Amino acid sequence: MRRTRLFLPTLKETPAEAQIVSHRLMLRAGLVRQSAAGIYTWLPVGYRVLRKIEQIVREEQDCTGAQEVLMPTIQSADIWQKSGRYDDYGKEMLRITDRHDREILYGPTAEEVITDIVANEITSYRDLPKNLYNIQWKFRDEVRPRFGVMRGREFLMKDNYSFDLDKAGAVHSYNKMFLAYLRTYSRMGLKAVPTAADTGPIGGELSHEFIILADTGESEVFCDRALLELPAPGPDVDYEADLQPLVDTWTSHYAATDEKHDADACPLSGDQLVTARGIEVGHIFYFGTKYSQPLGAIIQGPDGQQVTLEMGSYGIGVSRLVGAIIEASHDDDGIIWPESVAPWTVGLINLKVGDADCEATCERIYAALQTAGVEVLYDDRDERAGGKFADMDLVGIPWQLTVGPRGLKDGKIEVKRRADGEKSEIALDDVEAWIAERAAS
Ligand code: 5CA
């Protein structure tokens, strides 16, 4: 992408309405613009990041055998009346009346929609287990939308729903998600702490929240330092094996948010106890037959008896993750994207637009990067070098390649790594090898 063609409105000043660093940087780096309270338009750079996060979430879900569907944003009130949640959900639910005076709503979650489908379409135990997910916009009329996309009213969520014949199967489905979540966050460069949680309006008896530690988090977390050192499961995790021992290594360590923390019951003391603030980036629930019973997801079991399906639901705050990653990874100059979610991997800076040599070299490198499949943002604007460097830092591109007349005289260009600011020079002859290295990583 050429910077001269890109729609990237950056801001020099810190926007007054933004209280936390991720919100400030998302506005300054031109990722989003607010459309109404808690409702955002995703501009090209922000949308690229959002889609990368979405793709990691999707890949990790697919690995577990979950299948993607797309449910509507607008739902009928009927199914919510059947589950008994229509009145319970309160003012957070955006209720709408259509032209025929029928009550509809903008979905805050989708247990009812998917359970209704399964109730109608699955009749035999042979069709189980099933785990269906979608990545879809949700709406919750939060009393206090704040912190930009972190607590929005409209937000993108990955939500899935598992259907099993019995409790043991449902717990296995839950454990799959537990491990898949740890993998998902770790691929985004995040360390997530699973904490035992309350179930709120979703309900159920078993639930974990996944919390990223960050000073600006809305929850307070108390956890065992050992948890922060546990490595996330690798790509070779066998989801069909018994997952309980692996899950137990995580859940046997103490971890709780302030809602659940009990200072007297907490076994940790001194340096072993980490007290920090955190951002909830995911929440999983096992709730048995809470929805399958009222919505009639009842099938014929192996012995011909009627079985009410055992369910769980699992959410990841996809749009919230954009803010959470920035909270976890930034400095005074701007965002530091982990490569896996960066809008582009390489930023190419032409220091002297109009100089034939600089332009020819940049065009050659630009083409070579694209051919190698390395995503590149080429700053071809006729502007001061300082402004171009500042913009690349602000937007957080992991690698910056700078081409200027002085370096070219010696046959060299400069490489800077955004994460630690480390600079080095590479000979023009070695640029291809450098690109190949980026393509492979
Ligand atoms: N039905 C369940 C699981 S699918 C559910 O809705 N869970 S939830 O309420 O915990 O939401 C799942 C995730 O969505 C949360 O962990 C959080 O990361 C994200 N989320 C919730 N509310 C908001 C909001 N107002 N703004 C941005 N993200 C949100």
Image: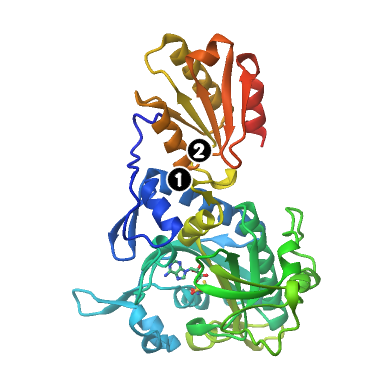
Is disc 1 surrounded by few (<14), some (14 to 19) or many (20+) residues within 10 Å? Answer: some
Q: CA distance from mark 2 to mark 1?
A: 9 Å
- Image quarter where the C terminus lies is top right
- The disc labelled 2 sits on which kind of residue? Trp
User: Which quadrant of the view contains residue 196?
Assistant: bottom right
Front position in the image: 295 or 302? 295
Check contact, mark 2 vs mark 1: CB within 8 A. yes
Give the number of the disc on residue 48: 1
Any part of residue 211 in sight: yes
- Image quarter where the N terminus lies is top left
Helix, strand or loop at disc 1?
helix
Is disc 2 surrounded by few (<14), some (14 to 19) or many (20+) residues within 10 Å? Answer: many
Q: Is residue 46 left or right of residue 126?
A: left
Q: Is residue 149 above or below residue 396?
A: below
Q: Is residue 276 above or below residue 395?
A: below
The residue located at (65%, 68%) in the rendering is 193
Front position in the image: 284 or 280? 280
- The disc labelled 1 sits on which kind of residue? Arg
Q: Comparing marks 2 and 1, which lies closer to the viewer?
A: 2
Front position in the image: 278 or 246? 278
Q: Position of residue 295 (x, y in %)?
A: 48, 84
Q: Is residue 232 left or right of residue 72?
A: right
Mark sitting earlier along the chain (2/1): 1
Please state the total of marks drawn on the protein image. 2
Helix, strand or loop at disc 2?
loop
Q: Position of residue 53 (x, y in %)?
A: 53, 52
The residue pinned by badge 2 equals 344
**Which color scheme did the rendering employ for the protein?**
rainbow
Q: Position of residue 262 (x, y in %)?
A: 65, 87
Any part of residue 161 in sight: no
Label 2 residue near ligand 1, CB within 8 Å? no
User: Which quadrant of the view contains residue 113?
Assistant: bottom left
